[in-house]
């Protein structure tokens, strides 16, 4: 089965560009209640996923960094601990199962690496559950 059916399109996904500040991302994540968001570059290509943990470790490991001055820290300067993998739009749903074990969502890119959306772990689990039900 083609994964296009499961995609939450980019327009419906909270994501951020690398030129955003740490404070902007913190506030956006808080507002939406997310613990991780995809990052894209100025060309729209997926470059990674930023997590609350990444932000916390940056805050902890940067002397004199406080919430007040996070507006001076570019997201590009926040190290990402884990490399979240993306998949091509041409991937099949079965190939996503292993990625969904360690990622809340799987970013989807087109043939040029342009971010086009995500597939949520819950959608993958629902797909697997429905297939198990039909087996019987």
Image (cartoon, helix red, strand yellow):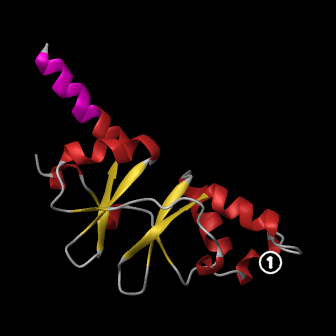
Which of the pair 84/125 is nearer the observer? 84
Q: Which residue is drawn at the image coordinates 77% and 66% (left, top)?
A: 59
Q: Which residues are magenta?
A: 126-135
Q: Quadrant of the N terminus?
A: top left
Kindly identify the residue that appears in the image at 55 percent across and 84 percent down.
19
72 or 128: nearer the viewer: 128
Magenta span: chief secondary structure: helix
How far from the left and from the top, in percent, is residue 23?
68, 72
11 relative to 31 in the view: left or right: left
Q: Residue furthest right?
A: 64
Q: Is 9 positioned to the left or the right of 121 in the image?
A: left
Question: Is-magenta flag for residue 69?
Answer: no
Dot 1: element: helix
Which residue position holds label 1? Answer: 69
Report the number of discs.
1
- The quadrant in which residue 127 appears is top left
Q: Is residue 133 magenta?
A: yes
Give the image quarter of residue 72.
bottom right
Residue that extends furthest to the top in the rendered view of this protein: 136
Residue 44 to residue 1: above or below: below
The x, y position of residue 74, in whole percent, is 64, 81
Rendered-image quadrant of the C terminus: top left
């Amino acid at each position: 089965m083609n994964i296009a059916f499961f995609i939450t399109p980019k327009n419906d996904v909270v994501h951020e560009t690398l030129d955003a500040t740490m404070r902007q991302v913190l506030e956006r994540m808080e507002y939406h209640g997310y613990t991780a968001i995809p990052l894209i570059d100025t060309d729209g290509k997926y470059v990674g996923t930023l997590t609350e943990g990444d932000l916390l470790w940056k805050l902890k490991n940067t002397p004199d960094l406080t919430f007040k001055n996070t507006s001076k820290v570019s997201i590009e300067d926040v190290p990402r601990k884990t490399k979240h993998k993306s998949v091509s739009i041409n991937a099949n749903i079965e190939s996503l199962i292993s990625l969904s074990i360690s990622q809340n969502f799987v970013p989807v890119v087109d043939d040029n690496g342009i971010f086009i959306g995500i597939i949520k772990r819950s959608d993958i689990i629902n797909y697997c559950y429905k297939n198990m039900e039909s087996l019987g």
